[in-house]
Amino acid sequence: MEGRKVTGWAARDSSGVLSPYSYHLRKIGSEDVLFKVLYCGVDHTDLHQIRNEIHSTTYPLVPGHEVVGKVVEVGSEVKKFGVGDIVGVGCIVGSCGECICCKTNKEQYCTKMVFTYNAIYGDGSFTQGGFSSAMVVHQK
Ligand SMILES: [Zn+2]
C-alpha cells in the first residue's frame, strides 16, 4: 500500500554520492504518525551503509536514523501524539509487539525488530530513513 509521495536523498550505489529520490511512504495505519522531517543527524553507520561497507545495503538507500520532526497527521488509534508535536526516531521503527522483549520495552532485542532504513517493514514495504522530507512510523 502506498501513501504520500516524498523526496529524500538516496545513495544509488557505493560511490558515496547521494541524489534526490522520490518514493512513496507506506500508508498511515491506525497507530502510525506521519511527520515532516526537521533535522536528521549524520552517523558513521549512515556512511557505512551508503558505501555498502557492511555488505547489506539495498539501493536506492535513504539513510538517517537520528531524526527529529513535527507531526502532520496521526492514525485513528494514536494516543501519544497530536498534530504539531515534535517527535524523534532512532534506529528502530518496528518490532513484533508481542514477545517478552517487546512487552518489557526492550524492542531492540526482538527477533523481528525492524531498522529505520535498509529493512523490510511488517507490511512488506522497504524502510527509508530521515534524509527525507517526511516519514511514517508507529507511535511507539
Ligand atoms: Zn517482539
Image: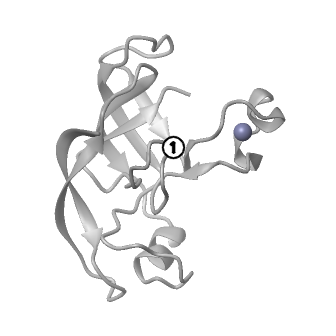
Q: Which residue does the image show at 30% across and 70% down from the upper left? A: 60
Where is residue 109? Give x, y as percent. 77, 48
Using residue 93 as the reference point, say whether residue 21 is left or right of it: left
In the rendered image, residue 7, in percent from the top left (x then y), is placed at 18, 53
Element assignment for label 1 = loop
Whether residue 105 is visible to the viewer of this picture, yes or no, is yes
10 Å crowding of disc 1: few (<14), some (14-19), many (20+): few
**Percent position (x, y) of residue 107?**
71, 40
Residue 9, x across and y down, in percent: 24, 64
Q: Is there any visible trace of residue 91 in the rendered image?
A: no
The residue at 37%/86% (across/down) is: 14
Residue at which label 1 appears: 122
Residue at the spot 52% in from the left edge and 85% down from the top edge: 53
Above or below, comparing residue 30 to residue 116 in the picture: above
Tell me the quadrant of ligand 1.
top right
- The residue depicted at 43 percent of the width and 30 percent of the height is 87
In the rendered structure, the answer to whether residue 86 lies left or right of residue 140 reads left
Can you say which quadrant of the picture contains the N terminus?
Answer: top left
Q: Is residue 5 above or below residue 69?
A: below
In the rendered image, which quarter is residue 32 located in? Answer: top left
Check the image and report above or below for 28 versus 58.
Answer: above
Q: Which three-letter amino acid code belongs to the residue tagged 1?
A: Gly
Pick whichever, 26 or 68, lies toward us: 26
Taking the image as shown, residue 94 lies to the left or right of residue 137, namely right
Tell me the quadrant of the picture where the C terminus can be found: top right
